[in-house]
């Protein structure tokens, strides 16, 4: 065999050499770390992209996020005014901040603001209670001259001892009032005097040359609407304030309490407070006893309420168990049948004397009657009968004797000083105990009695649509004399006790239940048509069962699907609030 060898051509040798050179270069690149650096850069880009996507949902990175609306502007046609356009973006703000459109208006000079812009500011400021208390002309003037300010935490707004030059409305945030100059005590005091959204301060400093009597410091980032003294006087706002002061002066002068006061002293009283408006059902104060103000009712009326704990009343305890005895498997009509007289007597004996058995008295009577015949009660001769003190005295039964019709309630019990009470039956109720009319005073309930004789129960004051003036109690006490003190003592009202309030609540509840049952029995069968189509029930926000205690389902384990309202108590756990109690009862026939 002959072997042939193939020698490569020069071109093939060059190509092979270039490939080997490229492989060596790639190896060098990898060895130098450039390839690894590129991979790290690609990985970091991917990680940063993931972070950017995840951070889109965080609003902390935006001070005020732009509000998105599908239809921000809508319009409708009116016969008198033509087409009316309403822009919702003018009234939108995030997290309660002042709207940006309104801030742009407040940045203008007061003389440059147009009438519709001032009206828009008035509409936005209706959310502030202190601003609503002013008359409509004064609201327009205030909206014309005020400016916008935002301050951070620990910023001192007003310093004690300095003359006031501005009037402040709080639109967002909280401030504290202190006695020191730098306001540092507000952050150390566990219960500082706070002013929140809707409050105002500094009004009296614009009308007089008096100095500030307290320091105001921001507890958090706060937004203010400020009225400066120069704009206040230039736009004649002081004349409108004088009109309101004259109105308050005439209100006090017409009260019998201040008939003996001089005009100078009455004018000092006018400067201590201002008229505040409260709508129907609005809370005025949570506790009249601990309130630091005296309240004068100028218009309308108010109600004094008391939150009573029904579980602390012996009358309520008896009432609950009397109705729980009707819970059993029998129909309601079975309770109308009278039991046997012997059974009734035995039940009366057990309920009246639950600790002793008086059947031994009957045994003693039979024994004395059997002496004459020589026969004992058990059938033996009297010689076999031994007289002991135990046979002549009532013997103790203890817990062995039980009622035949004992309750079948099986649920968690709460121990009270009167006995065990179902936990679900420990409820409370708001009861009206007094109504305050126009011209009356609230806040001096037993104020002149010794502290150990005062009624310290908390009372709640709720408005029924009223205008009132609140004055600090210590300032008012500095102005009154002995004659005024006697008048206040005579005008004091004595509130009923909690037991009386509880009895009245249960009587009203029994009457309301009887009235509803009677109306349902007489009216509803005639009102209903013979064929009533089935209609789906509408879901509402308010469920009437939320404020009703149902004793029928007190031993059921199924939890209610409706909300339950709880009322806070001082130094006690929250208490469920009800308006009525639905109890087992006999059928109306």
Image (cartoon, grey):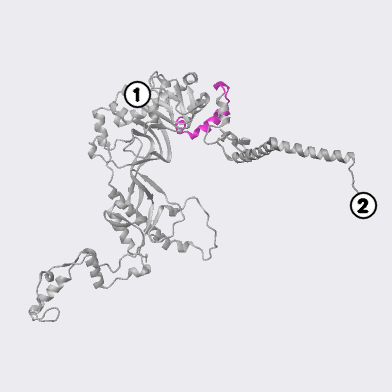
Question: Circle 1: is it few (<14), some (14-19), or many (20+) Cα within 10 Å?
Answer: some
Instruction: Provide residue 129's location: percent of width, then percent of height.
Output: 45, 34
Q: Evaluate whether residue 374 shows in this view.
A: yes
Q: Measured from the top left, where is residue 558 in percent x and y? A: 44, 60
Name the residue at 56% across, 37% down: 59
Q: Secondary structure at mark 1?
A: helix
Q: Quadrant of the N terminus?
A: bottom right
Within the magenta stretch, is there residue 124?
yes
Q: Which residues are magenta?
A: 108-135
SS type, badge 2: loop
Residue nearest the viewer, comparing 192 with 108 = 192
Residue 438 in magenta stretch:
no
Q: Which residue is label 1 attached to?
A: 267
Labels 1 & 2 near each other (Cβ < 8 A): no
For disc 2, the neighbor class at 10 Å (few under 14, some 14 to 19, many from 20) is few
Residue 433 occupies quadrant:
top left
Where does residue 213 sit, x and y in percent of width and height?
Answer: 37, 23
| Residue sitting at the far front | 1
Taking the spot 57% from the left edge, 23% from the top edge, the residue there is 108
Residue 2's disc is: 2
Predominant SS along the magenta part = helix
Residue at figure coordinates x 9%, y 75% from the top left: 386
Q: Is residue 78 something that shows in the picture?
A: no
Using residue 120 as the reference point, say whether residue 327 is left or right of it: left
- Residue 124 relative to residue 287: left or right: right
561, 12: nearer the viewer: 12
The one nearer the camera, 61 or 501, is 61
Give the Cα distance between marks 1 and 2. 139 Å
Q: Is residue 511 above or below residue 151?
A: below
């Amino acid at each position: 065999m002959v072997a042939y060898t193939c020698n490569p051509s020069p071109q093939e040798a060059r190509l092979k050499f270039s490939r080997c050179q490229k492989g060596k270069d790639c190896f060098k690149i990898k060895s130098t770390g450039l390839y690894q650096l590129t991979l790290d850069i690609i990985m970091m880009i991917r990680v940063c992209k993931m972070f950017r996507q995840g951070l889109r949902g965080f609003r902390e990175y935006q001070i005020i996020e732009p509000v998105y609306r599908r239809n921000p502007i809508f319009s409708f046609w009116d016969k008198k005014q033509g087409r009316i356009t309403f822009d919702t973006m003018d009234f939108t703000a995030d997290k309660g901040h002042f709207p940006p459109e309104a801030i742009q208006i407040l940045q203008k000079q007061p003389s440059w603001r147009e009438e519709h812009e001032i009206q828009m500011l008035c509409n936005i400021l209706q959310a502030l209670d202190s601003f609503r208390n002013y008359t409509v002309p004064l609201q327009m003037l205030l909206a014309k001259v005020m400016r916008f300010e935002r301050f951070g935490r620990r910023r001192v707004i007003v310093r004690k001892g300095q003359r006031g030059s501005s009037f402040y409305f709080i639109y967002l945030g909280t401030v504290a009032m202190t006695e020191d100059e730098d306001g540092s005590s507000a952050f150390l005091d566990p219960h500082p005097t706070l002013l929140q959204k809707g409050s105002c301060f500094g009004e009296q400093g614009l009308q007089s040359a008096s100095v500030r009597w307290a320091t105001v410091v921001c507890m958090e980032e706060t937004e203010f609407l400020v009225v400066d003294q120069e704009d206040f006087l230039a736009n004649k706002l002081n004349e409108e304030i004088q009109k309101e002061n004259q109105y308050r002066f005439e209100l006090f002068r017409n009260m019998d309490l201040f008939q003996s006061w001089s005009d100078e002293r009455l004018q000092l009283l006018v400067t201590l407070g201002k008229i505040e408006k409260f709508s129907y059902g609005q809370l005025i104060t949570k506790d009249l006893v601990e309130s630091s103000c005296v309240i004068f009712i100028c218009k309308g009326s108010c109600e004094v309420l008391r939150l009573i704990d029904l579980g602390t009343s012996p009358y309520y305890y008896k009432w609950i168990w009397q109705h729980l005895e009707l819970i059993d498997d029998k129909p309601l009509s079975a309770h109308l049948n009278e039991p046997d007289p012997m059974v009734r007597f035995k039940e009366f004996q057990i309920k009246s004397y639950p600790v002793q058995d008086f059947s031994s008295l009957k045994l003693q009577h039979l024994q004395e009657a059997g002496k004459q015949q020589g026969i004992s009660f058990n059938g033996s001769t009297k010689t076999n009968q031994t007289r002991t003190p135990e046979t002549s005295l009532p013997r103790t039964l203890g817990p062995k004797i039980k009622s035949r019709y004992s309750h079948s309630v099986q649920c968690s019990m709460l121990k009270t000083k009167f006995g065990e009470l179902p936990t679900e039956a420990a409820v409370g109720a708001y009861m009206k105990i007094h109504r305050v009319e126009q011209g009356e005073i609230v806040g001096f309930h037993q104020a002149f009695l010794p502290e150990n004789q005062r009624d310290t129960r908390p009372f709640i004051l709720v408005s029924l649509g009223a205008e009132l003036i609140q004055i600090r109690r210590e300032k008012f006490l500095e102005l009154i004399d002995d004659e005024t003190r006697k008048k206040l003592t005579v005008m004091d009202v004595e509130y009923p006790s909690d037991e009386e309030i509880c009895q009245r609540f249960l009587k009203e509840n029994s009457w309301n239940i009887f009235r509803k049952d009677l109306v349902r029995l007489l009216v509803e069968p005639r009102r209903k048509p013979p064929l009533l189509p089935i209609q789906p029930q509408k879901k509402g926000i308010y469920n009437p069962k939320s404020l009703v205690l149902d004793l029928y389902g007190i031993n059921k384990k199924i939890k209610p699907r409706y909300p339950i309202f709880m009322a806070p108590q001082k130094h006690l756990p929250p208490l469920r609030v009800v308006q009525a109690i639905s109890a087992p009862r006999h059928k109306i026939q």
